[in-house]
Image (spheres, rainbow, N blue to C red):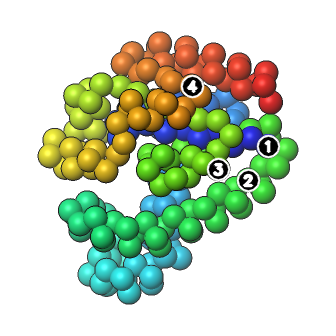
């Protein structure tokens, strides 16, 4: 089974493209969503130990804004968080693969596929790109967040030009229809080469 990495900067539209692949029956693993789920389950005690119990509210749910504020303003704290989350997500991905043994390929979506080094264990990589200003506008609308908060997050992500060199397929996503057409072409190629 091949592992196809799917990545792109925040707001590029990678989740939108992942959902299209899902609609075609491809098993897809959403690393960021799984990471979020783990933070609210088995990683809770480790996170409390490292960052303090006040990160969780009375209902025991993680205050994501508080955590983001902490780690995205402090590189050392981000490293600590990644050290806890990344191995747990990697484990969950192994379980996912064993649950889809008969698939020709699976897609692993991750915002920081390159930055984390996880791209090295992918057979091929799909990169979704869109201009920075467009990405900021999309995320402001999607998350009701500020331009500054998005730009802070972008500082931790590689430039598209750096990612393109290491990618096998690039999906340009200014216009959704064109992006889906390109995704369809990639899907055909993946089916042929697997
Ligand atoms: P990412 O997962 O890369 O952060 P999303 O797929 O969540 O990005 O897309 C960000 C937002 O932009 C979402 O609200 C999505 O519906 C919207 N979006 C994605 N692609 C397009 C597009 N081509 N045109 C307009 N809006 C888009």
The disc, 2 or 3, on the residue closer to the chain's N-terminal end is 2
Q: Which of the two residues, 77 or 46, is positioned nearer the viewer here?
A: 77
Q: Is mark 1 within 8 Å of ligand 1?
A: no
Bin the neighbour count of mark 1 within 10 Å (Cα to Cα): few under 14, some 14-19, many 20 and up. Answer: few
Q: Earlier in the sequence, mark 1 or mark 4?
A: 1
- Say left or right for 22 vs 73: right
Please tell me which of labels 3 and 1 falls first in the chain. Answer: 1
Instruction: Return the residue at label 4.
Output: 169
Does the rendering let one see residue 44?
yes
Q: Which residue is mark 2?
A: 97
Residue picked out by circle 1: 1
Q: Secondary structure at mark 3?
A: helix
**Label 2 close to label 4 by CB (< 8 Å):** no
Q: Residues within 10 Å of mark 2 (few under 14, many from 20)?
A: some
The number of callouts visible is: 4
When asked about the image quadrant of residue 158, the answer is top left
Under circle 1, the secondary element is: loop
Q: Is residue 20 visible?
A: no
- The quadrant where residue 104 appears: top right
Mark 3 vs mark 4, CA separation in Å = 16 Å
Q: In terms of sequence position, does the residue under pointer 1 or pointer 2 come before the other? A: 1
Q: How far from the left and from the top, in percent, is residue 23? A: 63, 30
| Residue 74 pos. (x, y %) | 23, 66
Residue corresponding to mark 3: 121
Q: Compute the Cα span from label 3 to label 1.
A: 12 Å
């Amino acid at each position: 089974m091949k592992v196809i990495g799917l990545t792109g900067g925040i707001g590029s539209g990678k989740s939108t493209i992942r959902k299209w692949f899902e609609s075609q029956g491809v098993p897809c693993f959403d690393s960021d969503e799984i990471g979020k789920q783990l933070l609210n389950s088995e990683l809770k005690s480790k996170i409390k130990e490292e960052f303090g119990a006040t990160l969780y509210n009375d209902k025991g749910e993680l205050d994501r804004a508080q955590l983001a504020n902490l780690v995205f303003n402090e590189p050392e704290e981000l490293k600590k968080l990644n050290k806890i989350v990344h191995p747990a997500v990697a484990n969950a991905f192994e379980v996912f693969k064993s649950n889809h043994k008969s698939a020709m390929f699976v897609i692993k979506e991750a915002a920081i596929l390159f930055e984390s080094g996880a791209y090295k264990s992918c057979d091929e990589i799909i990169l979704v790109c869109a201009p920075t200003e467009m990405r900021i506008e999309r995320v402001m609308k999607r998350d009701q967040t500020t331009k500054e908060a998005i730009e802070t997050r972008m500082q931790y992500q590689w430039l598209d030009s750096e990612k393109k060199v290491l990618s096998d397929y690039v999906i340009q996503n200014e216009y959704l229809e064109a992006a889906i057409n390109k995704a369809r072409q990639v899907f055909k190629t993946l089916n042929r080469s697997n």
